[in-house]
Image: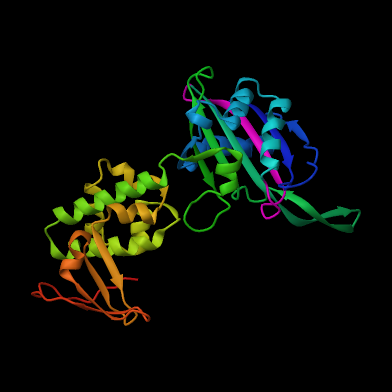
Amino acid sequence: MPIQRVHSFLVYPAKHAEEQPEISGTRIPRRGRLYVMLTNVFDRARDECDIEIVFRQGEGGQQQNDCRDLLMAYAQDPSVRNGRLLASRLQVVTTHRSGLGLLFLMKGARDGNHQLVISRFPADQGVIAQEHAQQLSVEFIERVFMKSAKAYKSALYSSDSLQRGFWDGRAVDRQISGPRELSDYWIHDFLASELRTTGPAGTKRLAVALRSAIRSVEELGIRQELISAASLLRGQHGRRRSTRQMLEQLGLSRPAALALEAAFPRADLMDEIFEFDQEEFQRHAPYRAVELDNGGLLIAEDARFAEVFQQEVLNLADKRVRYVTEGRVIDESLRKTK
């Protein structure tokens, strides 16, 4: 059996609570429907947890992290006592918006490695109906868990040696709609982690690749499409997505997307998730865009923008300006930009 030990804990929303509720916990037997369902979560974790995370280091860059210490203690000795310490850590950062949750800790092995999977399932409301000698009793209950087994948060850690341990992991949040992201309290507060690719690093890599692609592409239409993308990407500030997801949202054509992918050092970097940083992008972006209230959009290389568009201030108080430029028309088309 891949799972060697499973524990479960009832976690209350108790962030900022003056007194923390007692946490009930138990060991789950390796049999029955619940164990079968958790085995599926354990086996799918490697594929489903597709967001790479890394534990934050201690103050001064020390190789120490409180949550990692608790996880390593549980991995080396999976017990109710060690598991409750992790559940307590989750409880003190859980808000009423997240609500009551059921935490599962699963320790096992996969492909010769030690594997630890942490999953949190939310509570729901429901009605239970029971028949008694042709009579029906109906009761409202507030603690229904895992009715679909599709809405949960998970994190996965794997290592070939528990003595050496792990610093990297993977996570997923199936309770967030839309593009896959992670709840801040799950990754930052509970797991004391951050995205493996930091916002500035991922944003710089995208900006540099975009600049290289624009310069290398010969076909004018693709180049202009990439230039437009450089302008529109500024609207992604603060969002955690991969470059590929951003391009899909912008509706970039396949030839343009392939041209950008070719400018990355490795194709898989297109799928790394990071938080887009507008300031960092601005520092490395090859083009500057100015949008006017009359619907005009001016785009040119950042280094030559003032040379291409001469600006004249008409009314300083109203911030009204006039831009003047001249050149030979080399392409003209209708294009959806938003």
Residue 297 percent location from the top left of the image: 27, 74
Residue 198 percent location from the top left of the image: 41, 43
Tally of marks: 0
Q: Residue furthest left?
A: 328
Q: Residue furthest top?
A: 163
Colour scheme: rainbow
Decide if residue 16 is on the left or right side of residue 226: right
Residue 89 percent location from the top left of the image: 67, 37
Figure check: 17 above or below 81: below
Decide if residue 168 is on the left or right side of residue 243: right
Q: What's the residue at 51%, 22% (across, down)?
A: 165
Whether residue 2 appears in this view of the structure is: no
Quarter of the picture containing the N terminus is top right
Residue 337, image quadrant = bottom left
Figure check: 190 above or below 253: above
Figure check: 3 above or below 309: above
Quarter of the picture containing the C terminus is bottom left
On whether residue 69 falls in the magenta region, the answer is: no
Whether residue 292 appears in this view of the structure is: yes
Residue 47 percent location from the top left of the image: 46, 40
Q: What's the residue at 57%, 39% (across, down)?
A: 41
Q: Nearer the viewer, residue 61 or 241?
A: 61
Q: Nearer the viewer, residue 196 or 36?
A: 196
On whether residue 105 falls in the magenta region, the answer is: yes
Q: What's the residue at 70%, 51% (across, down)?
A: 99
Q: Which contiguous range is marked in magenta? A: 94-112
Q: What's the residue at 43%, 39% (across, down)?
A: 196
